[in-house]
Amino acid sequence: MTLPALGWQGLVVLATFGISLLIATYCTYAERVIAAFLQDRVGPDRAGPFGLLQPLADAVKLFTKEEFFPAGANRALFVFGPCLAMVTALMSSAVIPFGNFLQFGDTIIHLQGIEINVGMLYVFGIVSLGVYGIMIGGWASNNKFSLLGAIRAASQNISYEIAMGLALIAVLMMSGTLSLREITLQQSVAGEWHFWNIAKQPLGFIIFIVCAFAETNRTPFDLPECETELIGGYHTEYSSMKMGLYLFAEYINVFVASAVMSVLYFGGFNFPFQYELRDWLVSSRGLELVTAQNIITILGLVGLFAKIFGFIFFFMWVRWTLPRFRYDQLMRLGWTILIPLAIFNIMLTGGLITFGVIK
Amino acid sequence: MESLSKRAKVLEKKPMTFAERAYLPAIFQGLTITMRHFFRAATKKQITVRYPDETRPFSPVFRGLHVLKRDEAGRERCTACGLCAVACPAEAITMVAGERKKGEENLYREEKYAVSYEINMLRCIFCGLCEEACPKAAVYLQADKMAPPRFERDEFIYGKDRLVEPVTPDNRSKRGIQLTPEQADKLRAQLA
């Protein structure tokens, strides 16, 4: 990779970082507005037009709140917990391919932070690290409610990561690669009728999305927070921006989970008839192939974000519809239903690949 | 025996069907319900009253903050009989009666009047029994005013200065009443 290309790639990483933060910021606003609309209320509408400055007001509030350390807390770990949660949440968005590539002369910019051939493993590894932020924060608080929340978070994430990984294996069996870019590109091939993975893996997708809810600690699986039983769960003792970091990390995790689901099952930055549109732009509009490809890339970028926002909306929609699971129900669902179902899905996929029904 | 209401149901504890155990159909049912509400927010009229900008109108029979009325000549109607204090179930009303002096006929309608009249708004339950008990039609609960929130407890004890219907000394002459300068000063002091 040449030096200017490396510089461009650095810019893409920075942009990914900024976009993750921006989306997390406005997720707080979207959550409140969607919650309000689903409950026939109005929602925040005072700060700025339609309340759009509400996240700013919230940030100012969080930054100016009292920084509180509970007695007997391990101060270093107490600070380290939210930091780790935030860092791991931000790191996982680096490998997501947000768009194909832009070409200006000889410079090719891939709209992806880092392309690594084990992208999916990287995301899994980082997401598993995320639970340490919750664990450490909950333990360092020196509060039994926090500790209970942290233990719940750990056991829940371990249980659901297994089912999630098994659901993913079925996708990997078809793609034969762990690279997210490769998986995306395989879902749309020029000149032939090609389906996104959701058409081949409906069961796997359902398992994956249920596990994604559990991994991001969202309702109906938000037992680590569980305000009715555990006050605030792992962040009971947190105040000020340390609390804000935990909330932010949750929304970034939602964003990353939405992005991963879009990439794995909904074609990533592909959209229907993209090659036809590119050829039409070249043949009828007289554009150069490079320009046409750039236009397609930008449209694909917009398309991917539309898919991501759709998933984020779904996350919020479910949150304000379903009540919380009981803890034994959560464990039973994970171990006795989702894991066997995921194994069955692997065998089904293997059989279908063997008999050439899907590839 | 036949059930009197339609509410009573025989409790059946049959095992759940596969669709019920699979969660998903019920979840989609719930999701459609919330989605209907989501779009209702866009189409139907909102029921939210945006309070500081708009206020919900009071009912015409609302019982709010008390007022001690004056008669058509501007004199205080209250004769300090104490019936309101007796009627009050919350024991919020206290008063001290006094005798009207010569020359005060245009201030107080009856020969006996309330020197002080206090209602503790923290005790008051706004039932309106004082209004019903009053033989002189002196005390009323206004339909358009409420006792505003305050920081101190003693600020909730409303005396005559805040209860008596305000009449400025200057506009009383238009209502056919002549005040001596001393009376006007006394009234001003009372209203201040």
Image (cartoon, coloured by chain):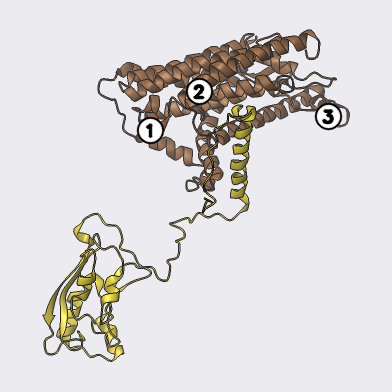
Q: Nearer the viewer, mark 3 or mark 2?
A: 2
Which residue is drawn at the image coordinates 63% and 16% (left, top)? A341
Q: From the top left corner, tell me how far across and down residue A14 is, in percent.
A: 55, 22
Rendered image: mark on residue A63: 1
Rendered-image quadrant of the N terminus of chain A: top right
Within-10-Å neighbours for mark 1: few <14, some 14–19, many 20+:
some
State the residue position of label 2.
A330
Which quadrant of the structure image shows residue B136?
bottom left
Q: Residue furthest right?
A: A283
Percent position of residue A84, x then y: 43, 18
The letter of the brown chain is A
Q: CA distance from mark 3 to mark 2?
A: 51 Å
Secondary element type, mark 3: helix
In the rendered image, is residue A175 in sight?
A: no
Kind of residue at badge 2:
Leu
Q: Position of residue A240 (x, y in %)?
A: 36, 31
Left or right of A184, for residue A292: right
Three-letter code for the amino acid on which mark 1 is drawn: Phe
Palette colour of chain B: yellow
Side (left or right) of B57 relative to B9: left
Can you tell which of label 2 and label 1 is closer to the viewer?
A: 2
**Pointers 3 and 1 in contact (CB under 8 A)?**
no
Q: In the image, are marks 3 and 1 on the same chain?
A: yes
- State the residue position of label 3: A281
Q: Earlier in the sequence, mark 3 or mark 1?
A: 1
- Residue nearest the observer in this picture, A352 or A18: A352
Say which element carries label 2: helix
Q: CA distance from mark 3 to mark 1?
A: 50 Å
Q: Which mark is residue A279?
A: none
Quick one: B151 or B117, which is closer to the camera?
B117
Is residue B180 visible in the rendered image? The answer is yes
